[in-house]
Amino acid sequence: MDLKNRDFLKLLDFTPQEIEYLLDLAADFKDKKKNGVAHRYFEGKNIALIFEKTSTRTRCSFEVAAYDLGMGVTYLDPTGSQIGQKESIADTARVLSGIYDGIEYRGYGQEIVEELAKYSDVPVWNGLTNEFHPTQILADFLTVRERFNKLSGIKFVYLGDARYNMANSLTVGCAKMGLDFTICAPEKYFPDAQLVKTCQELAKQSGGSIRFETDSQKAVKDAQVLYTDVWVSMGESYDTWEERINDLLPYRVTQKLMDAAAEDAVFMHCLPAFHDLKTGIGKSIGEKFKLDCLEVENEVFESEKSIVFSEAENRMHTIKAVMAATL
Ligand code: CP
Ligand code: NVA
């Protein structure tokens, strides 16, 4: 499998075999790391990390993965460069690709990372845009595979706002890898119709399926994975919370929903999660709307069925695989 010099912008650009290869490579890197086997295959190379939105997991994963591979890293925060204000994406791409061997970008529209890739001579990796979060899906799938020893045929339910990066990328990933994927949301929160049409075609080829459900109790029957994301994403206005809470409260992952799912069901979340009031936003929203959690109950988040921290760890192993495969 040769992915050298490829960008990693969205899963739609990769075949199921290529995705499987990246997961296998990540599993191998994880094994090496756990056993203290050095893998500094890219000594002398350097990468740039552009973050126009904040991050814990993605930034740390790119940095540690790069160090493990022997590379140097420069982190450009939302205020630490000329990007956007004084220098265009096209110019930034041509400057950075003369200095670095790879560029990660987290920001707003997907078209920005696509433009960065168009003008860059080195691989560009999408660290999250409004529309897609492809490295997250690799981590999610590695975690599912570790738990169930397979991806194909897994009954996977996403609950919440399905119009954004997480649901879009999960829809593509599940369709490509043959999972039985259910989107559970109010109808107005279903994903873009064109993307769904494309994914329905992909699901036909992989033997997977995509189903839509507005009733959360019905959706989770026999489900093996219950997945959710924050109800208001980075870059959205604080005023959005009221409408989202009104619309999405029936889609919160509760203990009752977990009990209605399959016996071996797990809870997953890309994180960060509002499962209690121990965060600035969680506290302010919780007090304003008289809620003690938002998209997931603390009881579920802290339960044995919650595999969110393995999922977070797997961000690093999978991002390492993406860099090693494409550099
Ligand atoms: N899941 C995820 O992308 O987390 P960060 O925003 O912390 O990178
Ligand atoms: N939908 C969330 C995902 C965070 C990893 C956001 O974009 O903020």
Image (cartoon, rainbow, N blue to C red):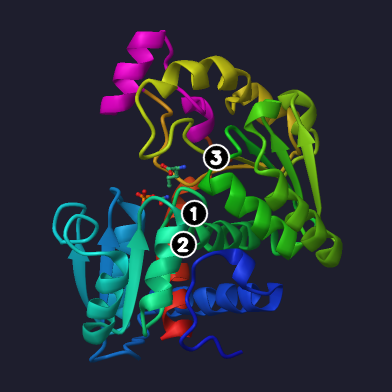
**Nearer to the camera, 56 or 120:** 120
Q: Is residue 287 magenta?
A: yes
- For the residue pair 158 and 310, the one nearer the viewer reads as 158
Residue highlighted by disc 2: 314
Q: Position of residue 229 (x, y in %)?
A: 51, 38
At a point 62% along the width and 52% down the height, the residue shown is 170
Q: Which dot marks residue 304? A: 3
Circles 1 and 3 in contact, beta carbons < 8 Å:
no
Q: Residues within 10 Å of mark 1 (few under 14, many from 20)?
A: many
Question: Which numbered tag is attached to residue 311?
Answer: 1
Could you tell whether 201 is left or right of 184 in the image? right
Label 1 residue SS: helix
Q: Nearer the viewer, mark 3 or mark 2?
A: 2
Q: Is residue 280 magenta?
A: yes
Mark 2 is on which residue type?
Asn
Which x, y percent locates residue 266? 63, 43
Q: Quadrant of the C terminus?
A: bottom left
Q: Earlier in the sequence, mark 1 or mark 3?
A: 3
- Mark 3 touches mark 2? (CB < 8 Å): no
What residue lies at 61% left-to-right and 89% top-to-bottom?
1
Label 1 sits on what residue type? Glu
- In space, the residues marked 3 and 2 are separated at their CA atoms by 18 Å
The part of the chain drawn in magenta is: 277-301
Q: Is residue 206 visible?
A: yes
Residue 308 horizontal/vertical position (percent): 48, 46
